[in-house]
Every structure is written in structure tokens, then in C-alpha cells.
Image (cartoon, grey):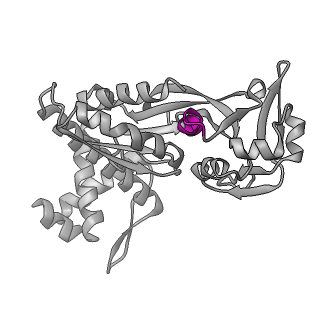
Amino acid sequence: MTGLFSDIEPFLAVAAEGSFRKGADRLALTPAAMSKAVARLERRLGVALFLRTTRRVTLTPEGERFRERCLAASREVEAGAGEAAEARSSMSGEIVVTAPFIVGRLLAGKLPEFLRLHPALSVRLELTDRRVDLPGERVDIAIRIGAPGEADLVSRRLAGLRWTMVASPEYLAEHGVPETPAALAAHRGLAFLAPSGRVAPWRFHDAGREFELPPSPGLVVDEGEFLVDAAAAGGGVAQVFSFMAAIFVADGRLTPVLERFQPAGPDMHAVMPAGRNANPRVRATLDFLYAVFSGF
């Protein structure tokens, strides 16, 4: 393994410079030494990393993928060195958290409290529905709904989510309160358009059986929080995760309906690169996130 690591630096230098000679100058080695190091690495990996011509050196597809992995590993090593240099009790610096858009509203209302408890910390919250490459993008914690993801990540379950079906009191006063899922056919539906382009079905359970129904015609949107806003404005009936509607239900802007028919939802996890959960800043943030979501 030692030989592998010693040959990676020449490989990265050649890839960065596009030349064995320039890569050698970068590391103060001879071009012959660079060529031997790359050749050893290619033999060890069993693939060609570069396409060589008399005029230029370019990465093969396998070489490009290997380079990306090496750079990500290098960033992790640098991050680990920085963390090791910090005092173990350090509670200062920046925490980078990514989360789906649908948790943005709830976190926006809770993060100021966390920062008051830890005034030397700063939080960078990035809302995105894509699956983030945590090590490659220097992310400390990613909040994910559903399966936590890659096996090389550490995960902590934050909550078992619940579905809730809601409408505004004004809408229900005008259109009536549905007593069964079948009664929703007579109501205006507010539905979610999934990234796949499919309208997400409404989910129910009854007498130990789970089933789905297509949302009744109404409004279809690709943003979960918009569903909550539209329902609060009297637009119809929506099915969302309970944490999304909690503030609106608490202040009376939304009323839950068909509560006994609502099934359990997926789990929510916080995931992070291996070893990152030992950092005091990360542990404090995880505890905060658990406190926020575990009640839902």
C-alpha cells in the first residue's frame, strides 16, 4: 500500500500539468522517475491511466475516475489533519449541512436557537434535493429522507416520519370534511410532482392494509412547501409529512383530516463521512437535529 500512495502524487502531478516533464518539474523529479511511478501504478491497478502521444498526455476515462477519487481522498486527509489539530473540545468554526428543500422552513425557525447556544459556531445550510457527494463536496452532515445511502457513510436516525392530510378550516367549511379516502374524489387535490415526473399518489392504510389513490384533480407542484402554503390558502386537500404542516396546524391555519387512515412514512437520517461524527461540532449539530425532528 505504501508504494501505491507514493506513486499517486506523480500521477496527480502529470494529470494536472498534462505532461510528464512539467509534472516532474512540479515535484522536482526526473521525467524518467515520473514515468516509472505512473507505470507502476498502472500495473498495480490493471488499467491505463493516460493516453500518450508525442504531443500531449491525456487521462483515459479510467484515469479520470481514479483522479477524482484521489482528489476526494486528499481532501479528506487534509480535513482530518485539520480536525486533529483542533482541540477536542473546540466548538468553533463552520458546519456545512445539506438538506431537502422540504425541511428548510422548519430548520430556518430552529437554527437561530442552536446558534445562540453555540455563538462561536456558524452553519452553512444548503437546500438541495440531489444526492450530495459528502466527502467530495466537503459536507459535514446531509439530512436524507429514506435509505441513508452509501455504505461508507455513518448515519444516525433522526425520526420516523408520518404522513398527514390537511386542508384549511375555510376550505373544509365550504366543501365538507372527508370521512374516508374514497370521499376525496369529491375534493380539490393538491399533489406533489416527483423528480421522476410522476405525480406522487396519496398513501393510506386501513384494517392493516396499505393502499394508494391518485390525487383528485386540482394543483400539481414540484415543491413540497408550496403544497402546505396552497392548502393554508384554501386551495384544497394535501398530503405532506407531519413536520411540514406542524406550525400551520398549531396556529389553526390547517386542520388534519382522515387521521386514522394516515400511514407511517419513511425514516429521516443524518449521514456523514466516517469519522466526522467524532468532531464535537458535528456531535452538537446531530443532537440538535435529533431534538428538532424526533418529535415528528
Residue at the (18%, 31%) spot, across then down: 91
Image location (x, y in percent) of residue 78? 21, 44
Q: Main secondary structure of the magenta part?
A: helix
Foreground residue, 112 or 98?
Answer: 112
Q: Quadrant of residue 47?
A: bottom left
Q: Is any part of residue 257 visible from this angle?
A: yes
Q: Quadrant of residue 207?
A: top right
Taking the image as shown, residue 136 lies to the left or right of residue 259, namely: left
Foreground residue, 188 or 47?
Answer: 188
Q: Quadrant of the C terminus?
A: top right
Image location (x, y in percent) of residue 109? 40, 41
Q: Is residue 247 magenta?
A: yes
Taking the image as shown, residue 47 lies to the left or right of residue 266, namely: left
Residue at the (90%, 37%) spot, across then down: 182
Foreground residue, 259 or 66?
Answer: 259
Image location (x, y in percent) of residue 104? 46, 46
Segment tinted magenta in the rendering: 243-252
Taking the image as shown, residue 241 lies to the left or right of residue 40, namely: right
